[in-house]
Image (spheres, rainbow, N blue to C red):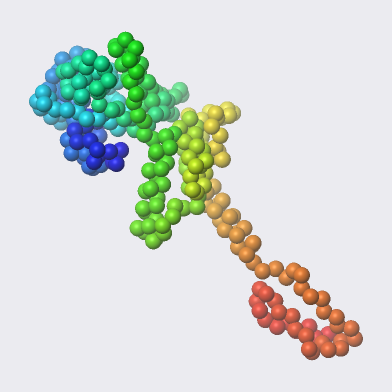
């Protein structure tokens, strides 16, 4: 999302606790960052059933939105108020060019909407999986279609399994390797550890098909994976924890290094046979070992 900072000036950021997402957006380079709290503080009728807490009221920034154009919406983190955030996102999606309080005649003038990932469910302390950002994305698209009598809202998702996320990660790896080690190529193998087959493993396997290097998918059992089931998107290996994944990667690389060294090691093969009948001419012969390059005494 940081690469979008130069494209959009005024943006709405959604999700997370308190002012965290606004702070993150500013750190990415976004200049004018608005939160749902700012909109609710300015006009409390926006969300009839959502009231700001005293802390939220202090943090939120009241402003005159009559001349403000919200150029894009970014859902940075999971929403803490689905109903209120949904209402504001739909208001803007139906607006004239991102202007609050307006209504488009065609319902195709709203700002683009970006979600930081598309996981419908995720694993938490509860015995069943919990709804995630992908579920909110689906609700936004469904609600827009219902209130506009069939219009389609196209939203965008970063994160896994979108190829763009892996391309971005590759660019970062290349930059880090060049700055830290003077290397101009990505690592030969990237070990990608994830706990969700539908996003982590699916995306890694897809990107591996077109990447210039090897992307090795590792599924850990600490997420939505259920013991005894076969995931729809199969990893290269499944382990219990992230530590096990790290150890697997290290062990695999060490074994590969040993295999390479063994392949390069000179071997005493196809050596000429020596005839030492009756010990004649023994002193005229010497055998050179390719491994150590030293004369061997073969005196009989």
In percent of the image, x 73 and y 70: which residue is there? 268
Foreground pick, 117 / 44? 117
* Residue 14 shows in the view: no
194 left or right of 234 in image:
left
Displayed quadrant of residue 23: top left
Q: Is residue 226 left or right of residue 31?
A: right
- Near-viewer residue (199 or 206): 206
Q: Position of residue 53 (x, y in %)?
A: 18, 23
Question: On the image, which quarter does residue 130 sit in?
Answer: top left
Location of residue 236 by image quarter: top right
32 w.r.t. 50: above or below: below
Tell me residue 47's x, y (percent). 20, 16
Question: What residue do we see at 39% from left, 56% from top?
Answer: 177
Can the viewer see residue 157 in this picture?
A: yes
Q: Position of residue 22 (x, y in %)?
A: 22, 35
| Residue closer to the observer: 23 or 240 | 23
Looking at the picture, does residue 232 appear above or below residue 44? below
Left or right: residue 298 versus residue 41 is right
Specify the farthest residue to the left.
64
Asked if residue 182 is positioned above or below residue 202 in the image, the reply reads: below
The quarter of the picture where the C terminus appears is: bottom right
Q: Residue at x 30, y 38 (%)?
A: 1
Residue 4, how many percent across, how many down? 28, 38
Residue extending furthest toward the top: 149
Q: Residue furthest right?
A: 278
């Amino acid at each position: 999302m940081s690469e979008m900072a130069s494209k959009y000036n005024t943006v709405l950021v959604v999700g997370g606790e308190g002012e965290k997402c606004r702070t993150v957006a500013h750190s990415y380079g976004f200049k004018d960052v608005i939160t749902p709290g700012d909109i609710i503080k300015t006009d409390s009728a926006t969300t009839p059933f959502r009231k700001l807490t005293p802390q939220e009221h202090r943090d939120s920034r009241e402003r005159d939105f009559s001349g403000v154009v919200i150029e894009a919406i970014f859902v940075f983190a999971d929403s803490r108020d689905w109903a209120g955030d949904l209402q504001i996102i739909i208001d803007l999606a139906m607006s004239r060019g991102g202007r609050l309080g307006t209504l488009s005649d065609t319902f195709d003038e709203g700002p683009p909407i970006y979600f930081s990932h598309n996981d419908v469910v995720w694993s938490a302390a509860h015995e069943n999986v919990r709804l995630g950002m992908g579920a909110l994305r689906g609700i936004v698209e469904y609600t827009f279609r219902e209130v506009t009598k069939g219009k389609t809202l196209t939203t965008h998702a970063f994160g896994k399994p979108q190829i763009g996320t892996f391309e971005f990660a590759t660019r970062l790896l290349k930059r880090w390797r060049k700055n830290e080690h003077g290397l101009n190529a990505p690592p030969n193998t990237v070990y990608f550890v994830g706990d969700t087959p539908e996003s982590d493993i699916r995306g890694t396997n897809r990107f591996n098909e077109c990447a210039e290097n090897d992307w090795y998918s590792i599924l850990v059992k600490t997420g939505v994976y259920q013991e005894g089931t076969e995931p729809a998107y199969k990893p290269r290996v499944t382990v219990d924890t992230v530590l096990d994944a790290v150890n697997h990667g290290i062990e695999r690389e060490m074994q590969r290094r040993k295999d390479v060294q063994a392949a390069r090691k000179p071997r005493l093969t196809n050596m000429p046979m020596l005839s030492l009948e009756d010990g004649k001419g023994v002193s005229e012969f010497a055998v050179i070992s390719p491994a150590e390059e030293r004369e061997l005494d073969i005196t009989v």
